[in-house]
Image (cartoon, rainbow, N blue to C red):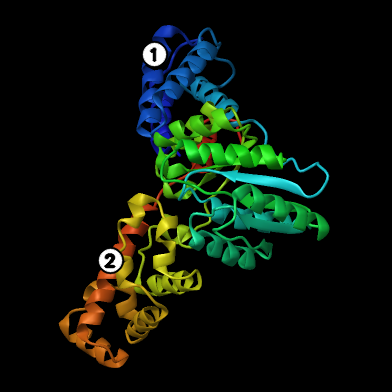
Amino acid sequence: MLDNLTTRLAKIVKTIRGEARLTEANVQDALREVRIALLEADVALPVVKHFIEQVRVAALGQEVVGSLTPGQALVGIVHRELTKLMGEAHAALNLAVAPPAVILMAGLQGSGKTTTVGKLSVYLREQKKKVLVVSCDIYRPAAIEQLKTVAAQAGAEFFASHSGEKPEEIAKKAVDHARTHYCDVVIVDTAGRLAVDEPMMQEIAALHAALKPAETLFVVDAMQGQDAVNVAHAFNERLPLTGVVLTKLDGDSRGGAALSVRHVTGKPIKFAGTGEKLADKLRKGKGFDLEDFKQQLQQMNKMGGIASMMDKLPAQLAGQINPAQLQDSRQFVRIEGIINSMTKKERANPEIIKATRKRRIAAGAGVPVQEVNRMLKQFEQMQQMMKMMKGGNLQRMMRNMKGMLPGMR
C-alpha cells in the first residue's frame, strides 16, 4: 500500500535520535509524516485521525530500550498499530453449519464479485468441497452468462437462473438443489449498482433474511479509495457482514481502502484479490504489447465479447472502450488476423508501425489499411486501461517496515 509511508518512516528513523524515551516533542513531527503518508494513500480522514491518536497514546512515555533508536521504536509502534487495525490473525471462512453452507456476496457493480466467486470456488474445491454457484442478478442477463463461464473455468456447478425470476426464489431453489445433490457450499452472486441505492439494499437484505448465510462477504474495489468508506458504511449498516474481500489490490498504488474499510466495518479482511493475469508483468514495469492485447481479446471473446462485458466494468474503465467497434466474433477474428500478420518486433513495439508496415500488415491479413488503424486505436485504449491498473500492495509495505527494525522478521 504505502511505499510513501515506508519512505517517510525511514526518514523518521534517521531524524529522531538521542532520546531515552518517546515524548510529545520528539514524536510530533514524526506523526505528521505518518499522517501525510496515510492521507496521500487515500485513507479516509476519520480513520487517519483515529490511527494517529492510537499511535500517539501508545508512544508517549515509551522507553527506548536495547539497540533501538527512538525512530526505530516509533516505527515499531506504527507497525504494531497497523497490524492491530488490519487484524493480527487470519480470519478463515466459517462454514461449520449443516450443508450446504451459503456464502452471500455483496458489493457494488464492478467491484469484482463474480470474479471473486470464481476464485472462492477454486479455493474451496482445493479443500475438497463441492461448490454450487448461482446468480441472483436478474437485471443483467450478461452477468448470469458471465458467472456460467466463470463457474466452468473454476470447476464449480452452475445453477441456471433467468431475468424473469425473483432473486429470493432463485436463491432458495439453488439451495434446495444443492441440498438434494449433496453440495457442500452455495455461493450466491448478487446484483450490484453503480452506486448504493435503497432498492438494492432492500433486495440484498431480503436475500440475507431468506438464506441465513454462514458467510456474508462484502466485496470492495481497492481502487475506489475514499468512496470505499461510504459504500462499506452503507452495507455494514444493512447487513450483518462477516468479512471483507478487497479486490484489485495490486491495481492501486495507494491502497488506503484497505485500512479504511477495515476500520469502518470492524470486520476482518478475509481475502485480498490481486490475480490479474497481467499483474506480474505490469508490476515489473514491462509494457502491455500487441501480443498481450490479442490474448486479452481472446479471453473476452470467450466471455461473450466486450459488449457483454461493458456493464461489468467500473465506470472509469468502461469509458475507455467503444463497444460498437468490437461487436461480434468476426471482428475478433479480423483483429487476431491483423496481429498475426505482424512481425514479433512489431507486436512488441507497436510505435514502429508506420504507413509502409501498415500496408504490408493489411495485405497479409486481407483487410483495408483502415482496419489496421482502427485496431491500433483499440490497442491504445486498452493500453491506457492497463496503465491505470499498475500499482503496489500492502504486503510489500509491511515487509519494508519490518526491515527497518532489528530482530523483526
Give the CA separation, mark 1 to mark 2: 47 Å
Q: Residue at x 59, y 65 (%)?
A: 148
Look at discs 1 and 2 and give the one toward the viewer: 2
Which percent across, then down, holds residue 403? Answer: 53, 36
Which percent across, then down, holds residue 294? Answer: 40, 75
Which percent across, then down, holds residue 39? Answer: 37, 29
Q: Answer yes or no: is residue 129 visible.
A: no
Amino acid at circle 1: Gln
Which percent across, then down, holds residue 118? Answer: 61, 58
- Quick check: 6 above or below 99? above
Give the mark, 1 or 2, whose residue is nearer the N terminus: 1
Query: What crowding class fits label 2: few (fewer than 14 Cα within 10 Å), some (14-19), or many (20 or more)?
Result: some
Q: Left or right: where does residue 312 sit relative to residue 348?
A: right
Name the image quarter holding residue 383.
bottom left
As drawn, the label of residue 380 is 2
- Quick check: 123 above or below 25? below
Quadrant in which the N terminus is drawn: top left
Q: Nearer the viewer, residue 226 or 394?
A: 226
- Number of marks present in the image shown: 2
Q: Residue at x 45, y 38 (%)?
A: 196
Q: Nearer the viewer, residue 318 or 358?
A: 318
Q: Left or right: where does residue 118 sit relative to residue 101?
A: left
Amino acid at circle 2: Glu
Mark 1 sits on what residue?
Answer: 28
Q: Nearer the viewer, residue 123 or 143?
A: 143
Name the image quarter holding residue 212.
top right
Looking at the rendered structure, the secondary structure element under dot 2 is: helix
Quadrant in which the C terminus is drawn: top right
